[in-house]
Image (spheres, rainbow, N blue to C red):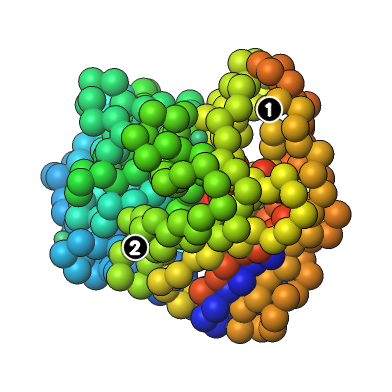
């Protein structure tokens, strides 16, 4: 496959810790453009983490509080955020040393519960699409508490049965060697609200929320029929083929990555689309709906994936290349064309992974590729199960 980005910017891979100041600065600029970064605290927004927007609450027994944040992610110009059910908001001691001293202004203050119950954070007016959120849970004083983190979104609006994320234990101290974060994705459908729930606080066992990073992502699952009855991975959008042959196809997806709220995805020159056997056990069973169907080539040639209408920014794409009926094994190269150059070689000799029938694969082939804005991807002899694009984030 070849990636063919078209606009300009540069890239910071997700979760990769930056060792390059220039890349980090570029990623910070990108975050301001597309991400929404919120820092909770008491009374006023100080201490406010650089690059974040403040959300301060009354220190004691705060009533439900809504604030609005101007954002390109909003359908009406501003995202409405409401915090309800906090028992307190507090500014505690600063982080004084260690790897997280640079995040002291974020991690030293929080909205919290110190008595059993549920605190909720509602995000309203987000554009339709998929988002990834990272929440921060640290206490420089009164840390160590645990709570259950759950959410409702466009895929699950049943407030009596929210989607569980984890049973979380907050980290603690003024010189932490690690901090607790939680990252998960949710989907906004038809203007649906997103509600996060933190349930805990028993016996002064603080359930703390320092802040969060919210960024749009685009997850595409190839192999869907036009009637939508093929297996669709949760939080992915289906690329609905119009036929089973080599015709080019473009589909428009709602995404906060788009300059106008949508991104066009085009596949050019495949030989087939296929739905193969499901994965029925093992580590990848939860990704069966993604990995069991494809757009592919089974004859030498070049297949292109094109992404257009992306906002300016740094991007990373994660692509999946697996076959569940032992028809993989195809070897392919990937190049990228973007503002930095044409046909840049980024992956060579990649082998599509295999499993058989319902068997559990021991591993699957994935590729992580960065690019500078507008992109397309070319390739041959490859099963393209799906792809996932998001904006860069700086190392921490
Ligand atoms: Ca404050
Ligand atoms: Ca609004
Ligand atoms: Ca703060
Ligand atoms: Ca699928």
Mark 2 vs mark 1, CA separation in Å: 31 Å
Q: Residue 151 or 111: which is nearer the viewer?
A: 151
> Could you tell which of marks 2 and 1 lies nearer the N-terminus?
2
Q: Give residue 328's quadrant in the image.
A: top right
- Give the residue at mark 2: 262
Tell me which residue sits at (23%, 20%) in the image. 160
Q: Is residue 387 left or right of residue 361?
A: left
Tell me which residue sits at (23%, 25%) in the image. 158
Q: Residue 169 or 333: which is nearer the viewer?
A: 333
The N terminus lies in which quarter of the figure? Answer: bottom right
- Give the residue at mark 1: 324
The numbered disc on residue 373 is: none
**Residue 170's spot in the image, x, y percent?**
51, 37
Where disc 1 sits, the SS reads loop
**Residue 341's spot in the image, x, y percent?**
69, 83
Tell me which residue sits at (42%, 37%) in the image. 225
Where disc 2 sits, the SS reads strand
* Residue 67, placed above or below residue 192: below
The C terminus lies in which quarter of the figure? Answer: bottom right
**Residue 340's spot in the image, x, y percent?**
66, 83
Number of disc labels: 2
**Residue 214's spot in the image, x, y percent?**
40, 56
Query: Is disc 1 surrounded by few (<14), some (14 to 19) or many (20+) residues within 10 Å?
Result: many
């Amino acid at each position: 496959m070849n990636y063919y980005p078209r606009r300009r910017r540069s890239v910071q891979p997700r979760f990769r810790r930056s060792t390059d100041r220039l890349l980090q600065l570029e990623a910070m600029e990108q975050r301001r453009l597309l991400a929404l970064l919120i820092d909770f605290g008491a009374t006023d927004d100080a201490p406010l983490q650089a690059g974040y927007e403040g959300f301060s609450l009354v220190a004691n027994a705060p009533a439900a509080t809504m604030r609005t944040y101007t954002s390109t992610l909003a359908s009406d110009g501003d995202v409405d955020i409401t915090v309800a059910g906090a028992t307190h908001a507090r500014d505690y001691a600063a982080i004084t040393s260690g790897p997280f001293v640079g995040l002291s202004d974020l991690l030293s203050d929080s909205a919290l519960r110190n008595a059993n119950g549920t605190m909720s954070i509602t995000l309203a007016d987000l554009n339709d699409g998929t988002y990834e959120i990272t929440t921060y849970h640290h206490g420089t004083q009164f840390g160590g508490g645990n709570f259950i983190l759950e959410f409702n979104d466009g895929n699950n609006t049943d407030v009596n049965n929210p989607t569980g994320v984890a049973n979380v234990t907050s980290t603690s101290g003024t010189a932490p060697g690690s901090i607790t974060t939680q990252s998960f994705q949710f989907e906004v459908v038809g203007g649906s609200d997103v509600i996060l729930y933190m349930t805990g606080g028993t016996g002064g066992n603080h359930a703390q929320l320092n802040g969060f990073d919210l960024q749009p992502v685009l997850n595409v699952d190839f192999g869907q029929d036009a009637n939508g009855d093929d297996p669709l991975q949760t939080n992915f959008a289906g690329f609905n083929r119009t036929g089973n042959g080599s015709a080019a196809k473009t589909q428009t997806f709602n995404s906060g990555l788009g300059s106008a709220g949508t991104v066009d995805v085009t596949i050019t020159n495949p030989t087939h689309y296929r739905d193969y056997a499901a994965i029925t056990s093992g580590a990848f069973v939860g990704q069966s709906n993604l990995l069991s169907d494809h757009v592919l080539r089974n004859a030498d040639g070049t297949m292109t994936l094109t992404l257009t209408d992306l906002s300016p920014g740094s991007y990373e794409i994660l692509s999946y290349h697996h076959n569940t009926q032992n028809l993989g094994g195809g070897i392919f190269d990937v190049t990228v064309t973007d503002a930095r150059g044409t046909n840049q070689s980024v992956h060579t000799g990649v082998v599509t992974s295999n499993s058989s029938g319902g068997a559990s694969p021991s591993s699957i082939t994935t590729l992580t590729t960065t690019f500078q804005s507008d992109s397309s991807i070319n390739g041959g002899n490859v099963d393209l199960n799906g792809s996932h694009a998001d904006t860069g984030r700086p190392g921490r």
